[in-house]
């Protein structure tokens, strides 16, 4: 299982249930990584998508206690239901896509974090873990800087030395 996230210079990820920046190169990167795969998220992240709709061409699984079941995505009302859904799939093809609370829940089970870093302060209200300070996580890849939407960004990858078993 992998986490994929875009962070600002303070590891901030969102405010007012929205992203901090509109970055087309990063969107393309996200699409390239997750298309055809399974993405898993918390309820606020689904609500933050355009029209509150799941993302196309991916299986969308949402942890939403009290959420109603629906046809366009898989709603899990608790962690046990989420484990059952994940157990039926290849964990290498599962991407944790947010938000802050759900990342915090799932990060110990991720073997990799794909992190886009934006060289700016987005005045975030919610944050990702600082992987440079989190025990067990190591930076293994870092791209050159790319200009995107007026910002300087970098594509990076961290690995978790000791991921926990989720299922
Ligand atoms: N920068 C990025 O890459 C990125 C990616 C995704 C999201 N975001 C941003 O992150 C922000 C949303 O973060 P968030 O923390 O508010 O939302 P979230 O993690 O998407 O959703 C939180 C909700 O999901 C359910 N949930 C999550 N973890 C749970 C757990 N362990 N147990 C039970 N239920 C759980 C709960 O639903 P109920 O409230 O229904 O009980 C909880 O209130 C937005 O600003 C969004 O734009 C940023």
Image (cartoon, helix red, strand yellow):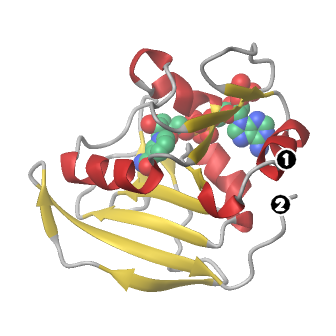
Residue 128 located left or right of residue 167: left
- Residue 30, image x, y percentages: 37, 51
Q: Quadrant of the C terminus?
A: bottom right
Q: Observer-nearest residue: 136 or 4?
A: 4
Residue 58 located left or right of residue 85: left
- Which of the numbered marks, if any, corresponds to residue 151? none
Q: Observer-nearest residue: 153 or 2?
A: 2
Judge whether 106 appears above or below 45 on screen: below
Cβ–Cβ under 8 Å for marks 1 and 2: yes
Judge whether 17 appears above or below 104 on screen: above
- For label 1, count other residues whose C-alpha is less than 10 Å away and answer few (under 14), some (14-19) or many (20+): few
Give the quadrant of ligand 1: top right
Identify the residue shown where x is 81% and y is 48%. 88
To which residue does mark 1 refer?
Answer: 83
Identify the residue shown where x is 57% and y is 71%. 112
Residue 9 appears in the rendering: no
To which residue does mark 2 refer?
Answer: 166
Q: Secondary structure at mark 2?
A: loop
Residue 147 located left or right of residue 92: left
Q: Quadrant of the N terminus?
A: bottom right
- Residue 71, image x, y percentages: 66, 15
- Residue 116, image x, y percentages: 35, 62
Identify the residue shown where x is 66% and y is 82%. 135
- Residue 36, image x, y percentages: 50, 46
Judge whether 82 appears above or below 68 on screen: below
Residue 86 appears in the rendering: yes
In space, the residues marked 1 and 2 are separated at their CA atoms by 7 Å
Q: Secondary structure at mark 1?
A: helix
């Amino acid at each position: 299982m992998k986490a994929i996230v875009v962070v600002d210079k303070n590891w901030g990820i969102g405010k007012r249930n929205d992203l901090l920046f509109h970055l087309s190169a990063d969107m393309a990167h996200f699409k390239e990584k997750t298309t055809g795969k399974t993405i898993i998220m918390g309820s606020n992240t689904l609500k933050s998508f355009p029209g509150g709709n799941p993302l196309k061409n991916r299986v969308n699984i949402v942890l939403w206690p009290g959420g109603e079941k629906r046809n366009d995505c898989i709603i899990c009302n608790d962690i046990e239901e989420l484990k059952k859904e994940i157990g039926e799939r290849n964990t290498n093809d599962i991407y944790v896509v947010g938000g802050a609370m759900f990342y915090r829940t799932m990060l110990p089970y991720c073997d990799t974090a794909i992190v886009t870093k934006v060289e700016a302060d987005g005045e975030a209200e919610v944050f990702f873990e600082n992987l440079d300070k989190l025990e067990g996580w190591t930076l293994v890849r870092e791209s050159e800087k790319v200009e995107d939407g007026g910002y300087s960004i970098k594509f990076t990858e961290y690995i978790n030395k000791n991921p926990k078993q989720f299922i």
